[in-house]
Image: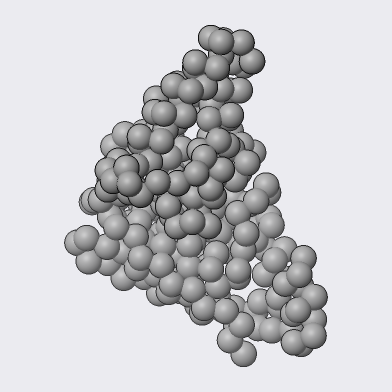
Amino acid sequence: MIIGIGIDVVENTRFRSILSNNKLDNVEKHFTTEEVVYCTKKKDSYKYFSGTFAVKEAVFKALQLQWKKGFSWRDIAVKRFNGIPEVKLSGYTETRAKSLGVKKIFVSISHCNEYAIAMVIITGGILDEQRSSVNSN
Amino acid sequence: MNNAAQLTATNIKNEMKKFIIDNFLFGNENESFNDDDSFLEKGIIDSTGVLELIGVIEEKYNIKMEDDELIPENLDSLNNITSYIVKKTATKN
């Protein structure tokens, strides 16, 4: 069953500024090496960083994560297989996903000139009485 | 904290407040926020904005934020940012 959905839209110019001001120093804190390699190969790489970050944010919302010590955007890694995006989790994010009984994360990304948007649907599940116990942690 | 340090903290707080107002509140100083307000909870800054904030902090104060420093206690309010920058620059000097 569906246990979470998330959606996020990112204005591309914001990542263009982030990249132009700090080159890759800043993005490397939040993106995996694989993500950086993938995005920087593309023309107008900032659009792909926007889309990748939109996926991370969508997953964050779908799993109802919290920004706290131990959380890293790199723990939500966006991978591409023949151009199809998938998400691999690690760290606190993976622990949270396991506690919710996550089985599969479906991802879709779209772009226009000004924005990138990503949507995530998470399937799996635990019994409702177990969920309220998990959410209180 | 002695007077020189207080002045530095005040300067940092004013600089960061100006950055936030100019970049996230459309330069509108009437859109005020308290020094302890959570940026994310109050909707002042979004997640992408936190990335932008990190970039500005590193460049403006010539410091490098480590992975374990990317936490709300260091970034999610004006007072938290100010305390972090003061501590980090004092450690560096």
Q: In this view, does A63 lie above or below B23?
A: below
Q: Name the spot of residue A35 as percent of width and height, x first.
A: 44, 52
Q: Name the spot of residue B79 as percent of width and height, x first.
A: 55, 35
Q: Is residue A136 among the parts visible in the rendering?
A: yes
Residue that extends furthest to the left in the rendered view of this protein: A113
Displayed quadrant of residue B22: top left
> Which residue is located at x 28 percent, y 46 percent?
B28
Residue that extends furthest to the bottom in the rendered view of this protein: A1
Q: In this view, does B22 lie above or below A73?
A: above
> Which residue is located at x 76 percent, y 70 percent?
A136
Whether residue A95 sits left or right of residue A66 in the image: it is right
Classify the position of the C terminus of chain B by image quarter.
Answer: top right
Q: Name the spot of residue A64 as percent of width and height, x first.
A: 60, 69
> Which residue is located at x 43 percent, y 51 percent?
B45
Classify the position of the N terminus of chain B by image quarter.
Answer: top right
Q: Is residue A31 among the parts visible in the rendering?
A: no
